[in-house]
Image: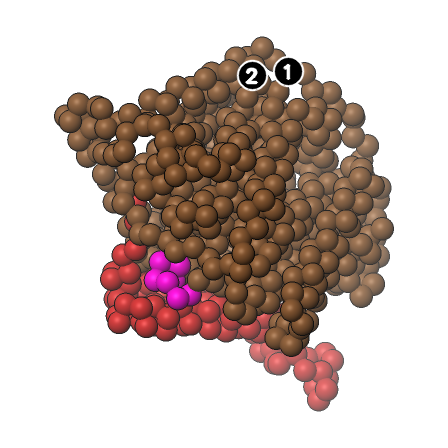
Chain colours: A brown, B red
């Protein structure tokens, strides 16, 4: 079964290479079918692996370079547990849905789009499955380069170029931070295998400047990909300009993989050597996640470009994912894992619904589209269901995720975490509901003093828009997102997976000494009253705030101008100038590194 | 082993960052990204360096000779390959942006903000 791991990654990458070579001469529409086939393979393999893997950790050593127990691992390994394989499966499912949606999306050189999508998907699967830190860096760069090119796919327009350029420079500098951290770790441990690095760091036991600097560099580098404040600026630009099906992958999994990498490397490599500093680590990461969730929610309320609005909503939720990881508790990590799945489906549905608006109405601006979506009933339902799934309604959507994180936070005496989650959810979901009400129902003021101005986006040409087909995919994803919260076994399996994910000793023993994984107690999940109360609060709050914000033009002029000027500095920080973004990146890395340096002594 | 290469790495990386932040020309900015990348080469090679070590090619040296670490050198090569891909994509963006704006100044790309 372990040989399925490399096949899962190799098939999309190989087919991408073959399509790049031969796509030009392929007969009509064959390239689409080849891509569907290549994307279906990882879906099938990922599903088989997720069902069969249990709580085991699968290892595959390339070329048979399996180390003898206790000896130095020369080879490169894939080491994948339920969380890694689950992420790869999520990548594959979203890739397949996006390819179906973008059937006949672009007229010219369509096969190049398929090549980029398959390479992007394959690289993300590899990133989720690998157990080697340099391998991780290479997959990171591969998925980044494919993502840059996909962002600028509509190269004949100016905005996608700017978005892609900002995205590319920010993420490349992030990747360099990761590489510098990897170099330092290699200098200390002489290994690139995650498990061997962990073992040697633990044996070495020094938590000096080098360990802290390496931890800072790797964490900050991956947090650039995870779009944490103040590294998040590229995300809104990239999402506003990339084609809608590409945004599904960006928001659904690419951002989350940054957080996955931080979690994986923390638990395998640093959890024991920096173990006595768990409290400062938790506080710093919680702070970053909280600031991100709040800033994203506030910015979300000020957007009229629908994809940019959804992008800020992704930033908000990414902040919540980091809160789940940062609590450093298995149950909160399980909450983050379930959250990622529910969010990926719901946000994917919303982006696809936005794409349908762009294709049918030639516009993606909330105010310009006011009332024009009345005839798109199924799309409107998909939009509403997607927004509901994100609003954490009782026993649906992100509910189990929120409940797990809130309960874990309560156990650690972080009483304010539920308030942050509720604020973030209400802020972002109310904006999504507001935009949906204006576009699909035509209610609300025609003007809004708080919304920013955006450039127009031209729709992607199509032979014949297959709206029925496209809206079915959007609705399916939205319902999937809503269902995630209703499946209690999913939360329980995630709790087991998170317990073995955080068990460093077991990971090292399985990869390096070929032991079996440590047994995990079956988990049972119970709803607590407080999580139901918070869930009702966020749901009602989202609708009330969303409805009220339709009528912001009715605010007295003094109030609205005071609000606008209070929000002006935040808006001005999102300048669209990549030089500013890199200055913020440097500043953020210095602050996080400084906080680690001060607290870890 | 002296501390000089590490200081040099930090200095070069800082120069690249400063260049990116203050750049008024997109192509200049792409070169600054490459400067940052050079800092990673310096760090990798410094970590693999051994005093009085020679190149790790065993064909014509006694196997008792001290050699530098070949792994970091291959990592550097991989890194260079990655850099080529990233620079190519960035330069393609710069070229297309010039066709649109008639300018290479990133401050004049003002489509996205807020």
Please give the chain letter of the residue carrying mark 2: A
Depth check, front residue: A251 or A141: A251
Residue designated by label 1:
A527
Residue B59 picture location, percent across and down: 72, 86
Q: Are marks 2 and 1 in contact (CB under 8 Å)?
A: yes
Q: Quadrant of residue A436?
A: top left
Per the rendering, the mark at residue A54 is none
Res A183 seen here: no
Q: Is residue A368 left or right of residue A193?
A: left
A596 is higher (above) or lower (below) than A420:
below
Depth check, front residue: A367 or A169: A367
Residue A158 lies in the magenta-colored region: yes
Query: Which residue is depicted at the point 47% across and 32% down?
Result: A286
Query: Which residue is depicted at the point 39% across and 46% down?
Result: A364
Residue A225 picture location, percent across and down: 49, 50
Q: Element type at marker 2? A: helix
The alpha-carbon separation of the residues under discs 2 and 1 comes to 7 Å
A423 is higher (above) or lower (below) than A355:
above
Query: Which residue is depicted at the point 63% across and 48% down?
Result: A97
Q: Residue furthest bottom?
A: B60
Res A387 seen here: yes
Q: Residues within 10 Å of mark 2 (few under 14, many from 20)?
A: many
Which stretch is magenta? Answer: A155-161
Q: How many marks?
A: 2
Residue designated by label 2:
A531
Residue A530 lies in the magenta-colored region: no
Q: Is residue A304 left or right of residue A218?
A: left
A492 is higher (above) or lower (below) than A304:
above
């Amino acid at each position: 079964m372990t040989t399925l791991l490399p096949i899962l990654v190799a098939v999309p990458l190989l087919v991408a290479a073959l399509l790049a070579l031969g796509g030009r001469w392929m007969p009509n529409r064959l390239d689409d079918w080849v891509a569907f086939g290549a994307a279906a393979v990882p879906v099938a393999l990922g599903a088989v692996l997720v069902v069969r893997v249990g709580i085991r950790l699968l290892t595959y050593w390339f070329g048979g370079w399996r180390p003898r127990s206790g000896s130095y691992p020369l080879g490169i390994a894939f080491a994948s547990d339920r969380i890694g394989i689950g992420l790869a499966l999520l990548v594959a499912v979203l890739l397949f849905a996006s390819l179906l949606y973008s059937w006949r999306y672009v007229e010219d050189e369509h096969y190049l789009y398929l090549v980029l999508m398959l390479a992007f998907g394959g690289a993300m699967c590899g990133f989720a499955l690998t157990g080697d830190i340099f391998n991780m860096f290479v997959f990171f760069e591969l998925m980044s380069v494919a993502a840059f090119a996909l962002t600028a796919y509509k190269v004949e327009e100016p905005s996608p170029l700017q978005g892609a350029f900002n995205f590319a420079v920010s993420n490349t500098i992030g990747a360099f931070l990761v590489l510098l951290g990897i170099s330092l770790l290699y200098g200390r441990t002489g290994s690139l295998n995650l498990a061997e690095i962990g073992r040697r760091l633990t044996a070495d036991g020094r938590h000096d400047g080098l360990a802290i600097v390496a931890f800072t560099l790797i964490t900050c580098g991956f947090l650039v990909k995870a779009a944490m404040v103040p590294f998040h600026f590229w995300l809104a630009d990239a999402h506003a300009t990339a084609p809608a099906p590409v945004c599904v992958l960006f928001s659904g999994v690419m951002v989350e993989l940054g957080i996955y990498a931080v979690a994986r490397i923390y638990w395998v490599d640093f959890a024991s050597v920096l173990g006595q500093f768990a409290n400062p680590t938790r506080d710093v990461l919680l702070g970053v996640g909280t600031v991100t969730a709040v800033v994203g929610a506030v910015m979300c309320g000020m957007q009229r470009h629908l994809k940019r609005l959804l992008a800020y909503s992704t930033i908000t939720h990414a902040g919540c994912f980091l809160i789940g990881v940062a609590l450093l508790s298995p149950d909160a990590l399980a909450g983050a894992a379930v959250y990622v799945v529910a969010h990926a489906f719901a946000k994917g549905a919303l982006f696809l619904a936005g794409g349908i608006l762009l294709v049918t109405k030639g516009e993606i601006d909330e105010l310009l589209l006011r009332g024009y979506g009345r005839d798109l009933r199924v799309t409107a339902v998909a939009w509403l269901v997607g927004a509901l799934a994100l609003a954490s309604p009782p026993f649906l959507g992100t509910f189990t995720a929120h409940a797990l994180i809130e309960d874990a936070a309560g156990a650690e005496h972080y009483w304010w975490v539920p308030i942050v989650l509720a604020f973030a959810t209400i802020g972002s979901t109310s904006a999504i509901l507001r935009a949906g009400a204006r576009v699909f129902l035509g209610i609300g003021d025609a003007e809004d003093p708080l919304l920013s101005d955006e450039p127009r986006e031209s729709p992607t040409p199509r032979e014949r828009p297959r709206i029925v087909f496209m809206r079915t995919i959007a609705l399916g994803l939205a319902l999937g997102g809503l269902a995630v919260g209703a499946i209690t076994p999913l939360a329980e399996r995630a709790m087991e997976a998170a317990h073995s994910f955080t068990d460093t000793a077991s990971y090292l023993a399985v990869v390096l000494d070929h032991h079996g994984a440590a047994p995990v107690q079956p988990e049972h999940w119970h709803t607590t009253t407080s999580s139901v109360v918070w869930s009702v609060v966020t749901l009602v709050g989202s609708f009330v705030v969303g409805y009220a914000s339709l009528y912001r033009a009715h605010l007295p002029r003094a109030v609205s101008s005071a609000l606008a000027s209070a929000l002006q500095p935040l808006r001005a920080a999102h300048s669209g100038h990549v030089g500013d973004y890199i200055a913020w990146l440097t500043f953020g890395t210095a602050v996080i590194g400084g906080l680690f340096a001060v607290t870890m002594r | 082993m002296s501390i000089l290469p590490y200081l040099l790495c930090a200095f070069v990386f800082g120069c690249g960052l400063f260049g990116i932040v203050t750049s008024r020309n997109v192509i200049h900015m792409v070169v600054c990204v490459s400067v940052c990348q050079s800092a990673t080469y310096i760090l990798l090679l410094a970590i693999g360096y051994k005093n009085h070590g020679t190149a790790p090619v065993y064909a014509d040296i006694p196997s008792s000779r001290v050699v530098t670490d070949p792994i970091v050198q291959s990592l550097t090569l991989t890194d260079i390959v990655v850099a080529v891909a990233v620079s190519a994509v960035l330069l393609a963006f710069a070229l297309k942006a010039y066709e649109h704006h008639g300018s290479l100044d990133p401050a004049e790309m003002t489509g996205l903000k807020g």
